[in-house]
Amino acid sequence: MDAIVVMGVAGCGKTSVGEELARRLGWQFLEGDGFHPPENIAKMSAGIPLQDEDRWGWLDTIAAHIALAREAKAPIVVSCSALKRRYRDRLSAGGTRVLFVHLDGSRDIIHARMALRAGHFMPTTLLDSQFAALEPLESGELGIVCDIDSSPAEIAARVSARIASVA
Ligand SMILES: Nc1ncnc2c1ncn2[C@@H]1O[C@H](COP(=O)(O)OP(=O)(O)O)[C@@H](O)[C@H]1O
Ligand SMILES: [Mg+2]
C-alpha cells in the first residue's frame, strides 16, 4: 500500500480520523485541503461549489505526493474528499496502490458537526452539493466504508483492524 486516502463529504471527519489513523500506523499525515490553490479556497469560502476543472490540479498534486510516498517506500495517510470515481482514479494514476476509506454518515449528523466546527473555510451551505457530487465506492475499487458513529480514535482503530484484509 502506498497511501490511505480518507474520503467523504465535508465535515465527515477526514482530518480527525486521518490524523488518528496516521498516528496509529506511524505514517505521515497529509492534509488534502492544504493543496488547494487560493482560488479554490476563495470559492468554497464564498459558498460556491468547486467544479471538476477546479479539482484536477489539486488532485494531481495529491497524486504526486502519493507517487513520492511509493518511491520512498514510506506510505502516507491523506485526507481528501475524493467524491467521484474519476477523482479517485486520478489520485492513483500511474499505478500507485491507494486504499480509500469512505467515512459515511447521515447529512444531519455531519451538518451538526460542521456547524460546531470553528475556523474552517467550508460553509455548511455547501454540504448538499457535496452529497450531490458523492459517488460511493464501486466494487472494482480498493476501498472500505466506515460509519462515523464512534470517536475518531475508535474509527481509526476499526480501520486499521480492517486494513490487513484488504492490503
Ligand atoms: N467521529 C467523530 N465524532 C465526533 N465528532 C467528530 C468526529 N469526527 C469529526 N468530528 C468533528 O466534526 C467536525 C468535522 O470533522 P473534520 O475532521 O474537520 O471533517 P473533514 O476533515 O472531513 O471536513 C470537527 O469539528 C471534528 O472535531
Ligand atoms: Mg478536513
Image (spheres, rainbow, N blue to C red):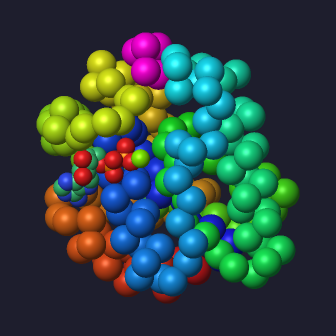
Residue drawn at the location 23% of the way across and 40% of the way down: 117
Q: Is residue 98 left or right of residue 120?
A: right
User: Where does residue 125 sit, x and y in percent of width and height?
Assistant: 30, 19
Q: Nearer the viewer, residue 89 or 22?
A: 22
User: Where does residue 22 sit, x and y in percent of width and height?
Assistant: 47, 73
**Number of marks in the image?**
0
Q: Nearer the viewer, residue 3 or 137?
A: 3
Residue drawn at the location 37% of the way across and 71% of the way down: 20
User: Image quadrant of residue 36?
Assistant: top right
Q: Is residue 147 left or right of residue 23?
A: left
Q: Is residue 46 magenta?
A: yes
Classify 123 as above or below 159: above
User: Where does residue 108 sit, x and y in percent of width and height?
Assistant: 15, 35
Q: Nearer the viewer, residue 76 or 97?
A: 76
Q: Is residue 52 magenta?
A: no
Residue drawn at the location 68% of the way across and 42% of the way down: 59
- Stretch of the chain drawn in magenta: 44-49
Residue drawn at the location 32% of the way across and 24% of the way down: 123
User: Where does residue 120 sit, x and y in percent of width and height?
Assistant: 35, 35
